[in-house]
Image (spheres, rainbow, N blue to C red):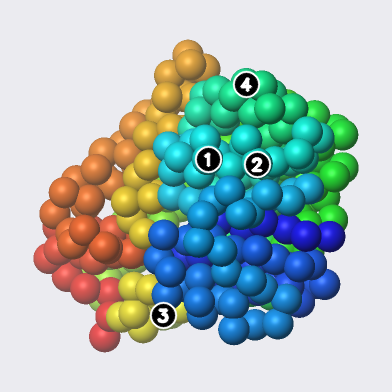
Amino acid sequence: MRIGFAGLGTMGGGMCRRLAEAGFEVAVFDLDTAAAGRAAEQPGITAVTRPEELAAPVVVTMLPDGAAVRAVAERLLPAMAPGSVLADTGSSDPGDTRELRELAAGFGVHVVDAPVSGSPAAARGGELTLMAAGDPGPLDLAEPALTALGRVYRVGPSGAGHALKALNNLLSSISLAATAEVLLAGRAFGLEPAVMLEVVNASTGRNHASETKFPAHVLTGGFDSGFALRLMLKDLRIADRLLDDAGGRSDLGRACRAIWEQARAELSQDADNVEVVRWLEAAAGRELRA
């Protein structure tokens, strides 16, 4: 099957290569023509210069937000055959997804949202988690391509995948901030962060941040998780609106967003998401690295 793929950033670059390895003929597009050229060095991948040239039974997007997806879709949809599927695997606002679905329906094209969770290495290795949402028929058509990228969970109707992705990232951010606060408090008491993590990860406080992000990206001083802080903040803002709509208590969610908002204002424009820990270190007046 021919697959169109738009967006060759940190995640998309690995995802399109994974699809080619799985046997798909992949046409790729990115505003960064150099990135498209690098991707096309792999057998099975062809770079195109216009979104319209991506037209295929399934087109996958891995773009920064719903506005970027819409910009590509407005040029792409007229070129897609009725019955084709546009699968948005990035993080978009669920409302944008539903509006895009209505736009695509006018061309007889289906839209599914299948945002991913995982690292750039997981993208390259086909080990992502995909939160797929939409009508069963279009999901069936897209599933061979999505399955090549990782484990697919069907989570509900249009927009449900993007809602779950934002909520997942909120929970991930809360864990990152809470782990940082705990480690900084222990550091002030004289405990070594590596020792604390070893014990926490053998105890009930363990989480993805304590098991992966701090050992691999914080204590090393790399701050290089591969996910931009500005993109995480975008997801936190989406999650905040979902919390408002739910009408319940959202104290932790609001506090977490406030931390990311302040860090975003004070860190560099291209800061990695885990650099929020660097910002928390500065506020505490101590570092976690030896």
Residue 62, horizontal then vertical, whole percent:
55, 54
- For the residues labelled 4 and 2, say whether their Cβ atoms are less than 8 Å apart: no
Residue at 43%, 33% in the rendered image: 238
Q: Secondary structure at mark 4?
A: helix
What residue appears at the point 68 percent right and 27 percent down from the top-left corner? Answer: 107
Rendering coords of residue 274 (x, y %): 36, 63
Q: Are circles 2 and 1 on residues that touch, CB within 8 Å?
A: yes
Q: Are marks 3 and 2 in contact (CB under 8 Å)?
A: no
Task: Identify the mark at residue 194; answer none if there is no mark.
Answer: 3
- Determine which of the numbered discs, if any, sits on residue 79 in the image: 2
Which comes sooner in the sequence, label 4 or label 2?
2
Of 159 and 83, which appears nearest the observer?
Answer: 83
For marks 3 and 1, the one nearer the N-term is: 1
State the SS at label 3.
helix
In the image, is residue 56 above or below residue 277?
Answer: above
Q: Secondary structure at mark 1?
A: helix
CA–CA distance between discs 2 and 1? 8 Å
Using the numbered discs, state the Cα–Cα distance from disc 3 to disc 1 in whole angstroms. Answer: 51 Å
For the residue marked with disc 1, what is the amino acid?
Answer: Arg
Label 3 and label 4: CA atoms lie apart by 51 Å
